[in-house]
Image: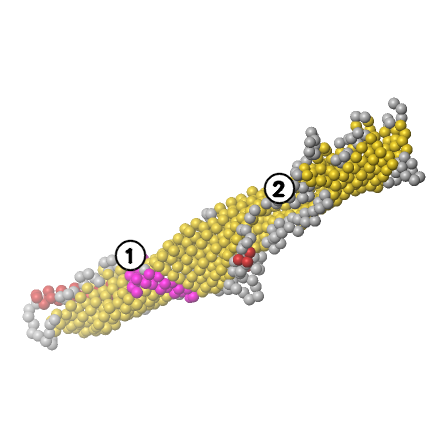
Amino acid sequence: MWGKRGLLPLAIFGIVAAVAFTYWERRQAQLRQRPVQPAVLPAGVGAAAQDWQWSRNIGDRPGVEIRARTFRHLQDPERIELEQVELRLHHADGTRFDQVRCGRAVFDPARAVLYSEGEVEFVMGLRPGGAHARLVWIQTSGVTFDNRTGRASTERAARFRLEEGEGSAVGASYDPGSRELHLRSQVELNWRGRGPGSRPMRLQAGELIYKENDALILLLPWARLHRGDAAIDAADTIVVLREGSIRRIEARRARGRERRQGGLWSFAADHLYLDLTPEGELEKLTAEGEARVESATAAARTVATAARMDLLFEPRARATILRSALAAGNATLVTEPVPRPGSSLPDARRLASEVIQLEMRPGGEEIEQVRTETPGTLEFVPNRKGKPLRRVQAERLWINYGQANRVRSVRAVDVVTRTEPGSDAAQQPPIETRSRDLLALFDPAAGELVRLEQWNDFQYREGSREARAGRGVLDQVSAKLLLEQSARVWDAQGSIAAERIELDRATGDVIAEGRVRSTSRSRQKDRPSTIVSREENFEAQADRMQTFAGRSRVLYEGRVQLWQGSERLEADRVEIDRAARRLWAEGNLVSRFAERRPGAARPTLLTVRAGRLLYDESERMAHYSGGVRLRREELEIEAPELRAWFRQTGEETTLERALASGGVRLTHRSGRGARTGSAEMAEYFAPEERAVLNGGTPVVEDAAKGLARGRRISWRLRDDTLEVEGGPGQPALSRLRRQ
């Protein structure tokens, strides 16, 4: 605390007793050898002197000088009394000396003890002429010096002053053999330190033991250290000195606090270690055993706990700035935002990992980054009813901060996330995601999550809804999930695969682009129907797909292909309205359908090409338009428009009839040759394989057999027979060629 020479004040006082004891022994020898003199001194006084002096050189330099105003050797009981005592002990270099003064001292030869009842003053480091280097001043009373052990002690109050500070205590002792100073109680030291840049520190303790040889100060059984707005309370404490400066403090069961410009921070641990600069500024704090550091600012309250914590500081003029912190061993970091008027309260955050590293922004008042060096868990705990609880588990986590210690982004690798719905959405399933990489972006003002991006084998699950992709992006504001790179979404309704999928989590609607493939699952397998039915599975391919109204409407665009079993539809654009049970298709439309009639050896293939299609499931009617061409077995129908009705029998769907209009041409090819028919309208009855032509001037022509014309022609395709009806002004006509 005050240096090796500065902590020998009581030892110097002991030299007075040693000199007195030496003088007494020599005086006794002289008295035994001289002749008996008549008594001239008062009774009981063996010797007396005024302005008494004694000195001894060490080699050719001064060693010890003792002066006393009066000297008396008393005989009953035998003792030596000195008054107005001054002792000078010269240093080995001969340039300085230590001085001890007291009003009165008594030496007991029998016990070899020197005692001074009054005040004793020690001044060390004096130079001849009054100049001094490092001056140490001590004042106390009731000092006892044991000449046999060299130990000096007092039970009374002692005050001391030195170059680095001043202090006081009650009860003190010094053992020159072990070079230990013991201040027994009520110890208080105001330590100024060295240099104009040092900040004062106040030390208090129940006891103080200074081990001069080891440059250690022990504070027992409690200690309190104050500096500016900082304070530490602890049990047993060790102070390590180096060249007159406090360089290290080791405290047990310690608690500390400091008020800074940005707020209040505190710390506690079973064992606390503080490393200081030569100017006394904190450069490192190590806490072990139930370590805890808490910071309270206007924006948030942050608490860090761990088995061990290391805080590194950047010393500056009369201040220290926190640079970084490392928490190891079951480490946690909890941040609770402080409510601010006029703004929403962000989520609280809890980070847990075996090792957590914290980096501060320049200035030391705001966090720049928090990261885990081992697997960790980050939780966002809602502060408002209805908000979700989010949890992130990862192999590594990086949390980047903006102004006012608000989270700016979170980066993670090998990560699993889970989002629990708020209390007002208890029926909603939790959301789980997985990926090798994650980046979460937050609103810098409100601290709310705005965007979550995950890539490298992204996986998503929300109840029965699941998704996979190379990359997934969740827009928290719009509640939309973007999937890219071999994306796929599936649930109880079906699945969608594409290069890019945008999923609306609130409605379940999607926008899929790039080699889209979708499957719609049957909801009721006991009610089979056609391709637009809500009960039957169907497959689809397209360049683009979009759903509306909770996926009750579906739009396919670009090289669309839909199929269900043997039914197949191709077009440039297809829209399905499941609620209205309708389908619209247009552009290069091709419809293929394999009918399986009871008793038939093979299915009947039905192909329709057209510009547009409107299918009404409630009527089981398909309306084709825009250059329609229907082909069924040997029959081909061409017309501007065509309506086809279907029948459902058990699990089989068959064509019931078709009505073509707008100028119809029919072609029937068989083993007997080809026959064509034309009319304004034509109706085809599939079960009977019969076509009825009417309107305009119906004509059926066979290149080999001739033609037939009438007002109405019924054509039985199966046996290739005709029934021709005439009318007023339009008689039936039949021309047959000879074979």
Relative horizontal placement of residue 301, taking residue 34 as reference (left or right): right
Tell which of 614 and 718 is nearer to you: 718
Can residue 55 be seen by looking at this rendering? Answer: no
Q: Amino acid at mark 2?
A: Lys
Based on the displayed image, in which of its 4 quarters is residue 15 positioned? Answer: bottom left
Tell which of 143 and 727 is nearer to you: 727
Tell which of 65 and 327 is nearer to you: 327
Whether residue 68 is situated above or below residue 397 in the rendered picture: below
Badge 1 is on which residue? 213
Main SS category, magenta section? strand
Residue under the point 48% across and 51% down: 377
Badge 2 is on which residue? 525
Which of the marked residues, 1 or 2, is nearer the chain's N terminus? 1
> Where residue 274 appears, x then y in whole percent?
39, 57
Can residue 307 be seen by looking at this rendering? Answer: yes
Residue under the point 39% across and 59% down: 268
> Where residue 157 appears, x then y in whole percent?
27, 70
Question: Which residue is the extreme one toward the left?
Answer: 36
Relative horizontal placement of residue 326, taking residue 239 as reference (left or right): right
Magenta-tinted stretch:
206-235
Residue under the point 57% across and 60% down: 445
